[in-house]
Image (spheres, rainbow, N blue to C red):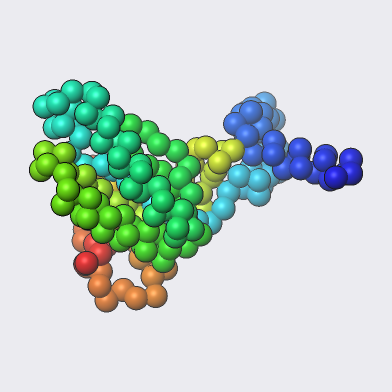
Amino acid sequence: MNQTDTDTASETSTRNTRETLDTLLDTILQHPERHGEILARIQNDFEQELAPLIIDMSGFTRTTHQHGIVAFLLMIRQMHRVCCPAIAEHGGTVVKTEADNLFCLFPDVASAQAAALDIVHRLETVNVLLPEDRHLYASVGIGWGRILIIDGHDLFGDEVNLACKLSEDIAEKNEILFTECAHAQLAERANTTPRELSISGLSLRYFQLQR
């Protein structure tokens, strides 16, 4: 690798870090006249159009209360061992984990849906061998849109927020829900059912996948 290639690789590896983003945001605060210029750079270096898939692992609060924190951690570990291979096999990436949640990104909604269905199927298979109070369930939310990604380890965006809301607060056990934007990307929509919910005076429209 020559010096030019080395410099290019170094620039690529550092341009979308947290430090770079903080510097750009500070520049906007200090020089508001450069807002448009810096915003365009942030969008170019940090944003991509992708499908966020958020998994909330259901039933863990009850398990922790009944069996303790080690049982909780064991279930999370087992959930990861089931979910992560399915995510990778369908072209997705696990960006981060937070407690009993997985935050993933896919190149398109169809891949995210395929991964979600595969995960639910694998969990149902695993549960046959587990005692009932240790069963593993996933509540899944899928979005689509411009996602801001920091160094491959964090993600932000309206569709990320909506997918989180669907997975954490709305989806039932092993239920797969789509945002409106994600649903619009599906080639086959006959097996989805529209739903609507009012949250803090705002109407949230989403779609449930019928399995």
Q: Which residue is drawn at 26% across and 42% down?
A: 57
Q: Quadrant of residue 210?
A: bottom left
User: Does the image show residue 54?
Assistant: no
| Front-most of residues 142 and 13 | 13
- Left or right: residue 172 versus residue 21 is left
| Front-most of residues 30 and 151 | 151
- Residue 92, image x, y percentages: 47, 54
- Left or right: residue 183 versus residue 205 is right
Tell me: residue 25, above or below residue 137. above
Quarter of the image with the C terminus is bottom left
- Residue 207, image x, y percentages: 27, 62
User: How many tags in the picture?
Assistant: 0
Tell me: residue 192, above or below residue 154. below
| Front-most of residues 154 and 160 | 154
Q: In which quarter of the image is residue 78?
A: top left
Quarter of the image with the N terminus is top right
Tell me: residue 108, above or below residue 75. below
Q: Residue at x 47, y 62 (%)?
A: 108
Q: Quadrant of residue 4?
A: top right
Q: Which residue is drawn at 48% across and 42% down?
A: 95
| Front-most of residues 144 and 121 | 121
Tell me: residue 192, above or below residue 94. below
User: Residue most toward the front?
Assistant: 129
User: Does the image show residue 193?
Assistant: yes
- Residue 36, image x, y percentages: 66, 44
Q: Which residue is drawn at 45% across and 58% down?
A: 89
